[in-house]
Amino acid sequence: MTAQIIDGKAIAQEVRLEWKVRADRLIARGITPGMAVIIVGNDPASKVYVANKVKACAELGLYSIHIELPENATEAELLAEIETLNRDPRIHGILVQLPLPKHLDAHRVIEAINPDKDVDGFHEKNVGALVTGETPFPSCTPYGVMVMLEKTGVQIEGKHAVVVGRSNIVGKPMALLLLHKNATVTICTSKTVDLARHTRDADILVAAVGKPNFITKDMVKPGAVVIDVGINRNSEGKLVGDVDFANVKEVAGYITPVPGGVGPMTITMLIANTVRAAERLSGLNK
């Protein structure tokens, strides 16, 4: 068996076109969805990611700005920028690029964002709403995975989904979104005893631990859907996921590559959340 590759780039393009229709509807009424990205410091990976977000906005006709603060920016300076954006009617979505320098309190910073503009879905109000299944802004990477599964035709209801990773950004919200679709969900970590026993039982396996090639062929149930959220550099400097792609694809039914899998979906769902925020703030929510 050789797995069917899930083309995240193609699915992301399809989904962006769907959301462009909604963005164009707003623009026709004189409301251009606007996103603001704040980056603190000079992390090269963060700068590339921010540039990709701004580019995606431009391609769909959205308004966007990005604010760069120096590595030694104070918390007060960062909070002041957020407050300005909270009040700016042109801005419907605000995100602060993580991770932040260690002297800044990420939790305090995220809580300063107006939850109605929290398109990353990290504010406590939106996290709480995710638990009840009512959040307007699901975390973008798990949201992208769910849309990817839907577009691929993967049945979720009644299936056993195993999420390896418990981060607030991916693991926990991923588990909740799968649960809301009536999957039976197991959450594991890299420290789980006899991890392979759990992963081999998964119909849908989501790897989000941040360890290159961590999920190996012997850990995967034949025919399983394997979603690789990891983005790592191996010893040769090559971009790889958390899944040993070359070998796991020989047993899986579906698998996402790295790059070209989950990554394009993350930015796409950020766009979706921004358009939805503009609809809500303008009283024109669908």
Image (cartoon, rainbow, N blue to C red):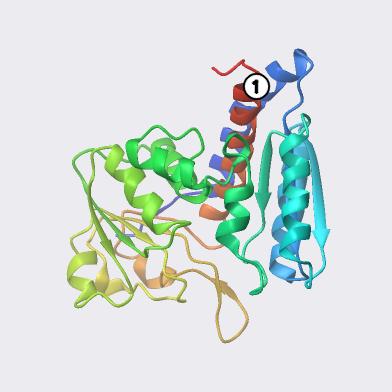
Farthest front residue in view = 76
Q: Nearer the viewer, residue 23 or 138?
A: 138
Residue at x 67% of width, y 54% of height: 96
Q: Quadrant of residue 182?
A: top left
Figure quadrant of the N terminus: bottom left
Q: Nearer the viewer, residue 235 or 251?
A: 235
Q: Position of residue 175 (x, y in %)?
A: 33, 51
* Residue 267 seen anywhere in this rendered image of the structure: yes
Q: Position of residue 277 (x, y in %)?
A: 61, 30
Q: Quadrant of residue 85?
A: top right
Q: Position of residue 201 (x, y in %)?
A: 18, 61
* Residue 261 seen anywhere in this rendered image of the structure: no
Amino acid type for the residue under numbered disc 1: Val
Farthest top residue in view = 29
Residue for badge 1: 21
Farthest bottom residue in view = 235
Q: Position of residue 12 (x, y in %)?
A: 57, 41
Helix, strand or loop status at disc 1: helix
Tell me if 157 is positioned left or right of 286 in this view: left
Tell me if 141 is positioned left or right of 114 in this view: left
Tell me if 173 is positioned left or right of 230 in this view: left
Residues packed near mark 1 inside 10 Å, few (<14), some (14 to 19) or many (20 plus): few
Q: Nearer the viewer, residue 64 or 127?
A: 127
Q: Quadrant of residue 237?
A: bottom right
Residue at x 69% of width, y 33% of height: 92
Figure quadrant of the C terminus: top right
Q: Nearer the viewer, residue 85 or 180?
A: 85
Residue at x 17% of width, y 70% of height: 197
